[in-house]
């Protein structure tokens, strides 16, 4: 998977995670809130992978 795809999937997971947290909070559903937090963290990690791939590619391109 390319860096752009990683970053896009990460952003989507982060957004869905935030929505789940909000709905969980509004409905007093702690399970949904927890799922949202986990999905948000997964999204953050995916974005970090994408950024790392970009950095590696830039380094290789400079060589």
Image (spheres, rainbow, N blue to C red):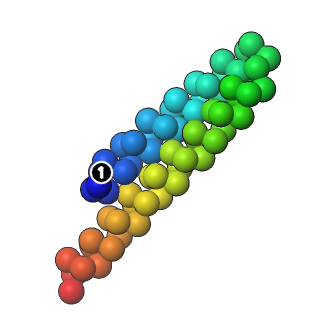
Rendered-image quadrant of the C terminus = bottom left
Residue at image point 32% right, 65% down = 54
On the rendered structure, is 29 left or right of 19?
Answer: right
Among the 4 quarters of the image, the one containing residue 30: top right
| Residue found at the far front of this picture | 31
> Is residue 26 shown above or below 31?
above
x and y, in percent, of residue 48 in the image? 47, 58
| Residue found at the far bottom of this picture | 63
Residue at image point 60% right, 47% down = 41
x and y, in percent, of residue 55 in the image? 35, 70
Rendered-image quadrant of the N terminus = bottom left
Category of crowding for the residue at label 1, using alpha-carbon neighbours closer than 10 angstroms: few (below 14), some (14–19), many (at least 20): some
On the rendered structure, is 35 left or right of 50?
Answer: right
> Is residue 30 shown above or below 1?
above
| Residue found at the far top of this picture | 27
x and y, in percent, of residue 36 in the image? 63, 33
Name the secondary structure under disc 1: helix
On the rendered structure, is 43 left or right of 63?
Answer: right
Q: Which residue carries the number 1 mark?
A: 4
Residue at image point 58% right, 39% down = 39
x and y, in percent, of residue 33 in the image? 71, 29
Among the 4 quarters of the image, the one containing residue 23: top right
Residue at image point 43% right, 60% down = 49
């Amino acid at each position: 998977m390319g860096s752009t795809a990683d970053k896009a999937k990460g952003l989507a997971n982060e957004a869905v995670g935030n929505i789940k947290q909000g709905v969980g909070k509004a409905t007093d559903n702690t399970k949904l809130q927890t799922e949202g937090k986990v999905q948000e963290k997964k999204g953050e990690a995916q974005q970090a992978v994408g950024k790392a791939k970009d950095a590696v590619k830039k380094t290789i391109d400079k060589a």
